[in-house]
Amino acid sequence: MIKKIVEKLHLDPPKTLVLGFALIIFLGALLLTLPIATVDGLGLNWLDALFTATSATCVTGLVVVDTGTTFTVFGQMVILSLIQIGGLGFMTFATFFALIMRKKISLRERLILQESLNQISMEGVVRLAKMILIFTALAEFIGGTLLSIRFAFDFPLSTAIYFGFFHAISNFNNAGFDLMGEFSSLTAYVEDPLVNLVVCLLIITGGIGFIVVSELYDYRNTRRLSLHTKVVLSTTGILIVAGTALIFILEYTNPKTLQPLSTMGKVLSSFFQSVTARTAGSNTLNIGDMYQSSLFLIIILMFIGASPGSTGGGLKTTTFATLVGAVLAQIKGKEDVIFFRQRIMPHMVYKSLTLIMIAQFIVLVMTMILSVTETGARFEMILFEVTSAFATTGLSMGLTPSLTPIGKILIVITMFTGRVGPLTIAFALAQRKQKEYFRYPKGKITIG
């Protein structure tokens, strides 16, 4: 259906992505309003259905109703389907079905797939789409099996299997939806090594990007990694380690979070919160009970987000690394940004600066408006919720369920913009460069 609409309207790839996501959200919301979708047999009201469908499709995880107790199996499967489609991209699934039916992938479809997968060129996009589907199925199967085994000690076998695979798919796609009930997420498993490590590995593998995963898989043959992969892995590692250490230090004496836990529990909890803040949304600690210093750290981690071409959102690790590199180069008096003995082109630095300015503008404007509409909420709660929505993280201090109708609409817009906006703008800027046949004379202004 999306393909026919695109061909009829002659939309370019960025507009196709926006329209595609919007249509999927609309269809998902429509299904969630059906009586069969909720336990009470009434279906969700349209606004809550739209909010839930947007959160699932944009793999955010913010919820206005509890997923485990509000929805029937049908409703939960609708949400899970939206998470899977939203995480991998609808064009990846369209390519998969086209290959099954042995249809040729057209040039227009390759262009849209290129945009969807965050690729610079069309070369190898179909092969990458195949690899994404295979790797996703394998990762979710292994993760789901391990979680099912663990949950079997607490639930009947059928429930344990269902819970195991639901949470594996949700966390691999960095969505953060859970079925534990009462908005509790995975707090019951705060000191469980298996649940903590499996979920964290799913979040990390889904968040580093499929380009990186593909290169790591081929490394045994190629014995080389691209600059992109090196930057993603090093930045991700630094952020996770630094986040873990800081949360451990800041929350060590908090009687509501780390203090009651064992030493192993403190380390696992700090590690989990550091990983999940990078756009995943699951939590093993009650986020609202954390100190303000820790919450501010999590806001920073959420804003940076995952990596390009992944199931996660946020500013992206490569954008953050490029900006840090530019600052360090300026401080050292160097003209070029150097990573691993390779020079970053100036237009990439400009693009990174553009992205962070757009992201900051959206977060600040939405926070300001919500400060007016949500008069009973504290400022840090509003900033936390907006950042979580824009970065498609899903962590919450508890504000989302009590949002006003206007607040819900604003968060919906923020989630949608965070999922497709910055990515689409970045590629639109990259693909629509116009050659200039003259240059203006140099001018000087005072900086700093």
Image (cartoon, rainbow, N blue to C red):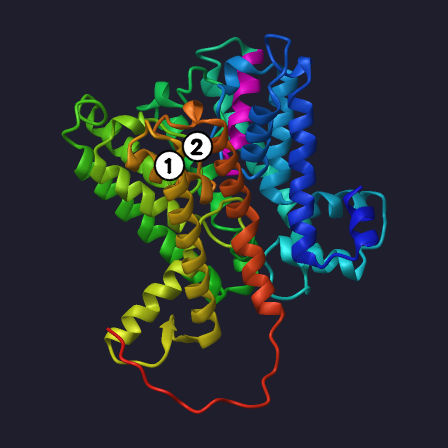
Pointer 1 local density, CA inside 10 Å: few below 14, some 14–19, many at least 20: few
Q: Residue 197 lies in magenta, yes or no? A: no
Q: Amino acid at mark 1?
A: Val
Q: How many marks?
A: 2
Residue 345 appears in view: no
From the image, which quarter does the C terminus lie in?
A: bottom left
Task: Please state which of residues 305 and 41 is positioned toward the viewer in this rendering.
Answer: 41
Residue at 45% over, 49% down: 314
- Disc ID at residue 198: 2
Majority SS type along the magenta span: helix
- Say few, some or many: other residues with alpha carbon within 10 Å of mark 2 (under 14 / 14 to 19 / 20 or more): some
Which residue is painted at 47% across and 70% down in the image? 348
Instruction: Classify residue 226 as left or right of residue 294.
Output: right
Q: Secondary structure at mark 2?
A: helix
Q: Quadrant of residue 79?
A: top right
Queried whether the magenta region covers residue 164, the answer comes back as yes
- State the image coordinates of residue 162 (x, y, percent, origin top left): 57, 19
Rendered image quadrant of residue 257: top left
Position of 116 with respect to 101 (left or right) is left
Q: Position of residue 72 (x, y in %)?
A: 61, 14
Figure check: 417 above or below 395? below
Q: Is residue 184 left or right of residue 126?
A: left
The percent position of residue 436, horizontal first and vertical second, equals 58, 85
Distance, label 2 to label 1, CA atoms, is 41 Å
Q: Amino acid at mark 2?
A: Val
